[in-house]
Amino acid sequence: MIKHISVLPGDGIGPEVTNEACRLLETVGAEFGHTFSFTFAHIGGAAIDAAGTPLPEETIAACRASDAVLLGAVGAPQYDRGPASGRPEAGLLGLRKALGVFANLRPITVFPALAKASPLKDEILKNVDFLIVRELTGGLYFGTPRERIETPEGLEVIDTLRYTEHEIERIIRLGYETARTRGRRLTSVDKANVLESSRVWRETVQRLQAEYPDVELNHLLVDNAAMQIVKNPGQFDVMVTENLFGDILSDEGAMITGSIGMLPSASLGNGGPGVYEPVHGSAPDIAGKGVANPLATFLSVALMLRQSLGMAAEADAVERAVNHVLTDGLRTADIADIGQSALGTAEMGDAVRDRLRAAAVKQ
Ligand code: IPM
Ligand code: MG
């Protein structure tokens, strides 16, 4: 099979981890008889440097013409000032909107070998395997007006939390559908005791429940959800929530696994190319040093293989290879024990590819 992948390395450690991911895909191709073609395009601060805008038209066109999009990270401290529309993050948000990827899936699983890297106690880590389904193209991230108003009494600022019923319904439906493919338990997270948008959210969840009688439903207020994620994360199967809540809760969920360097994500819409990216962001403090953990990007590649490219066996092989390096005790700096020597980005990439090849030979 030939598959076309748009690669958007972006900023910070993005180029390092996506480079390793492309090499990993080449190994998958060699072992399983596929060809992956890569089209590289700019996004974020890298795009501002190259083209004067965080999301050039060519980038959108390349993504639309591909089977899937692999994204590194956006965000660079030198662009932290100035209007929001000129920031690197505007490139990522614009891409999500342009491709209509309204659903962001962030699986939270614990690799047993990494249990020590988690700040949570062993007994709390038992049975942790849940999926956050985050709404990705609405809410506070996109609502208007969004402005600063100078008043005689001082500055007034406005952000707008706006959702249509259609946007709410399609993500909740996806939550229910996804729960059906897993443990049939759905937790809907909102702030219905305060926000009108959350009240419509909860009404929608309740209305749709009639169509999914086989899915056990539970509502949590977002503050309680934040607490439950560290208190008893094993209780969750699928958690569905709006954009900002999902942003915050998924970073919290990531820490269960020990490092945000382990968390992959898939952003999907209605049939167009999905966007696959590690959750960790650009990490400017370690950029260019060759020490970043590529595993979240590798696990994002596994999601891409499974969700967008119809290659489930290949996805399993990548996940097994990642698990294998961890059980062999190999670590990058972010997940190493104190005093343990750590591999660099490329060495970790080599180690995963070795395990992948060895496993393929055995089969
Ligand atoms: C994420 C990131 C982005 C978001 C930023 C970089 C705009 O934190 O993907 O979670 O807030 O969605
Ligand atoms: Mg985030």
Image (cartoon, rainbow, N blue to C red):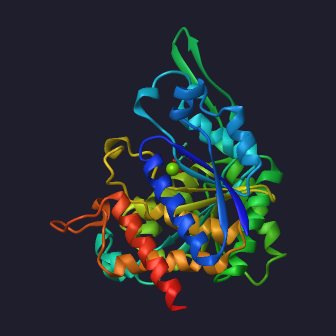
Between 117 and 232, the residue placed more toward the observer is 117
Quadrant housing the C terminus: bottom right
Determine the residue positioned at 55% across, 28% down: 50
Between 209 and 44, the residue placed more toward the observer is 44
State left or right for residue 118 relative to residue 178: left
Between 273 and 345, the residue placed more toward the observer is 345
Compared to residue 337, the image places residue 10 above or below, namely above
Indicate the position of residue 76 as horizontal and vertical percent values. 44, 35
State left or right for residue 279 relative to residue 30: left
Between 185 and 345, the residue placed more toward the observer is 345
Indicate the position of residue 88 as horizontal and vertical percent values. 54, 34
In which quadrant of the rendered view does residue 267 lie? bottom right
Residue sitting at the far left? 339
Residue sitting at the far bottom? 363
Counting the numbered discs, the total is 0
Compared to residue 116, the image places residue 26 above or below, namely above
Compared to residue 6, the image places residue 252 above or below, namely below
Determine the residue positioned at 62% across, 41% down: 41
Residue 232 visible at all: no
Quadrant housing the N terminus: bottom right
Residue 52 visible at all: yes
Indicate the position of residue 97 as horizontal and vertical percent values. 72, 43
Indicate the position of residue 176 as horizontal and vertical percent values. 73, 72
In which quadrant of the rendered view does residue 346 lie? bottom left
Determine the residue positioned at 62% across, 77% down: 32
